[in-house]
């Protein structure tokens, strides 16, 4: 029995060293060499300062002159990625979507005459699976372009050109829909304002 305990202990220590230390260090080292930007979280820097990540949504609600991300069940907190876990028959989900739609209309309707709840894109009122999706749909960006143009003083055609420039294609060319990275777009808007 003592021999079995010693063998088990040696196995636990060896496997921990291999899979808990050596393997992660090798993978981290290889990824730093092969994909240095992605391995560090696709951080975006401006003037030597990290301003965000291309992979994580951020809250821009304090500046009405910028594009807004989709609603988040986590408040755009990347340390707490989660979805709301509410089903399609949930009254709480229905109330949240109604509340998000009302807020969206209040923010965007003054710049988009005739905007109705039926015309609001899904991503403007529903959370993403992770809660920190950095993209919005083209339809959502086009609606928000009116507000951003009015608030920044940029011509709407210029804002729409920046939307187009910051649109990511479908994954692998055929998966999903094109999406607009909100951080990249807002940085472009801020650059155009200077």
Image: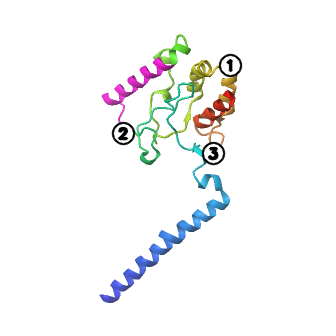
- Judged by depth in the image, the label closer to the viewer, 3 or 2, is 3
Badge 3 marks a residue whose secondary structure is: strand
Task: Say whether residue 50 is magenta.
Answer: no
Mark 3–mark 2 Cα distance, whole angstroms, equals: 34 Å
Q: Residue 69, position in %: x, y?
A: 52, 32
Q: Is residue 178 visible?
A: no
Residue 155's tag is 1
Q: Nearer the viewer, residue 123 or 181?
A: 181
Q: Which residues are magenta?
A: 86-107
Per the image, the residue denoted by label 3 is 45
Q: Residue at x 41, y 76 (%)?
A: 12
Q: Nearer the viewer, residue 176 or 51?
A: 51
Badge 2 marks a residue whose secondary structure is: loop
Residue 117 placement, left or right of 9: right
Quarter of the figure with residue 174: top right
| Mark with earlier residue (1, 2) | 2
């Amino acid at each position: 029995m003592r021999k079995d305990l010693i063998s088990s202990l040696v196995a636990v220590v060896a496997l921990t060293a291999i899979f808990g230390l050596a393997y992660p260090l090798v993978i981290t080292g290889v990824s730093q060499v092969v994909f240095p930007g992605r391995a560090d979280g696709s951080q975006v820097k401006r003037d030597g300062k990290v301003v965000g990540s291309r992979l994580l949504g951020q809250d821009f609600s304090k500046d009405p002159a910028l594009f807004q991300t989709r609603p988040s069940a986590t408040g755009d907190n990347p340390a707490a990625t989660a979805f709301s876990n509410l089903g399609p028959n949930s009254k709480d989900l229905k109330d949240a979507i109604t509340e998000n739609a009302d807020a969206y209309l209040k923010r965007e309707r003054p710049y988009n005459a005739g905007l109705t709840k039926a015309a609001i894109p899904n991503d403007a009122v529903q959370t993403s699976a992770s809660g920190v999706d950095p993209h919005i749909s083209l339809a959502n960006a086009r609606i928000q372009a009116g507000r951003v143009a009015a608030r920044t003083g940029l011509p709407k055609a210029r804002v729409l050109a920046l939307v187009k420039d910051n649109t990511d294609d479908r994954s692998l060319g055929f998966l999903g829909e094109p999406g607009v990275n909100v951080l990249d777009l807002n940085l472009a808007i801020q650059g155009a304002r200077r």
